[in-house]
Structures are given as C-alpha cells and as structure tokens.
Amino acid sequence: MVTGAGSGIGQAVADALHARGDELVLLARNEERADHLRQRYAGAEVRVADLVEFDRLAERVEGIDLLDAVVHSAGVIELEPVAELELGHLTHQLRINLVAPTELTRALLPALRAARGTVVFVNSSAGLVASPRWGAYAASKFGLKAIADSLREEEAAHGVRVTTIYPGRTSTPMQAKVHEQEGRAYDPADWASPESAAATIVHVLDLPRDATIPDVRFRPAPR
C-alpha cells in the first residue's frame, strides 16, 4: 500500500513497484484522484479514503488480510513563524503528517503481522532538526519519528519491520511550494530526484528477512 501516490516520492515509489509487477493498493482522497491513479496504474486496487477522516480509515481498508508493506508518503506543509502560526495550518499538518499515518498503521497491523510486513514512514530532515518557520511541520515529523521508534520495538515480536526515511530537499511539488514560501527560485535540478528516494525505499522493502534498516538519512549529493 502506498499513500501519496499522486505526486512526488509516493508517485515514484508506486511507479517503481508497478513497473516490476507488484500488486498495489493505493489510497486516493476523492474519486477524481482515484480515477487518475487507476489510469496510471492499471490493475492496481484504488480505494477512496480521505486521510483526515480518522474514524473511517479502518473501514476504508477492510478486507485487507495480508499486506507486505505500507509506505506512508502523503504529507502537507505550511511555513510560518510560531508567532504568526495559523491554528488551522498547525492542526492540518498534525492531522495529515502524524495522526493519519498512525491511525492507518493501527488499522493495518493485523494484515502486516500476518505477512511479517514492513512499514515505511517517509519523514523529513525536518523530523530531526527544526529551522525557523518550520516549527509546525517539524513538530508533526518529530511526532512521526516517535511513533515509528515506538512501533519498531513494539512490533518486533510480530516480525513487522519499521523504517523511517528522512529525505532532505527532493524535487517534488512540495519542494516547489517550499521555495515559493521561502521566496526563492526553484530549479528541480538542484535537488535529489524522487526516483532516487524511491529506489532507497524499494531497497528497504526488498531486504532479506534477516535484516532491517531502522532509519535512513537521504540527502541530495553535492553539486
């Protein structure tokens, strides 16, 4: 299962897995996005599930009894200094970046345990260090790190592996938005590609059963 498959790193992961014939379950926020995913990923199972409807997430993933992996790639960002932080922006980032992947993972744990599967949280370098104006986003990602670290230890007895990837700046639509909010010109060539991030994630998914990678720090190479 991949969330955020409509763009960026999530799309690159879905592309890589689909190209090699993996069976995909993709979540879309609405029917319009679902139709787009069905056209791009022929044969994939696409379910409509708004990640902020927490009380319905378990219902949206009913019937999945065996799941090799879930890649949490959906995310949102708004840059604002704490003094000017809009409450709606704060809560929305917490809901999408922290609460949604937590609740979705909880709903999927029986299927992941049955398959001795892997959970991958696409975090951020901001999940390790908070910079000015990044407080709300970083808070959501710091929280996601805590969930991943706890889950990793809790689920080890069930054979479930948990990996967090901390990408630095990557050429995605979110990165374009960040540059706009920072008032900087954006050139995708300046940063790592989402395909490179996806290759890292696929490597984690393909590890032999006798190994795990708890954390991966992913950065663009020096230019």
Image: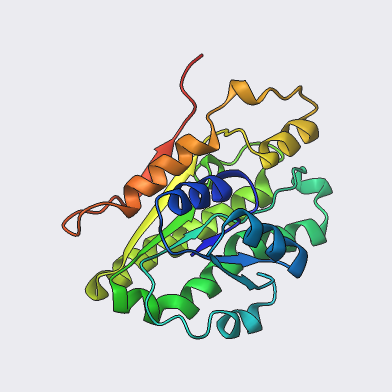
User: Viewer-proximal residue, 110 or 148?
Assistant: 110
Residue under the image location 60 percent in, 48 percent down? 138
- Answer above or below: position of 38 versus 221: below
Q: Position of residue 91 (x, y in %)?
A: 73, 63
User: Viewer-proximal residue, 32 or 171?
Assistant: 32
Residue under the image location 53 percent in, 64 percent down? 43
Q: Position of residue 126 (x, y in %)?
A: 56, 42
User: Viewer-proximal residue, 148 or 62?
Assistant: 62
Q: Position of residue 193 (x, y in %)?
A: 54, 32
State how the image is colored. rainbow
Q: Position of residue 189 (x, y in %)?
A: 61, 21
The image shows a total of numbered marks equal to 0
- Answer above or below: position of 123 versus 185: below
Please identify the quarter of the rendering in which residue 134 is found: top right
User: Viewer-proximal residue, 142 or 117?
Assistant: 117
Residue under the image location 25 percent in, 54 percent down? 212
Horizontal placement of 38 versus 105: left or right? right
- Answer above or below: position of 159 versus 114: above
Residue under the image location 32 percent in, 67 percent down? 117
- Answer above or below: position of 210 versus 124: below
Outermost residue on the left side: it is 210
Outermost residue on the top side: it is 223
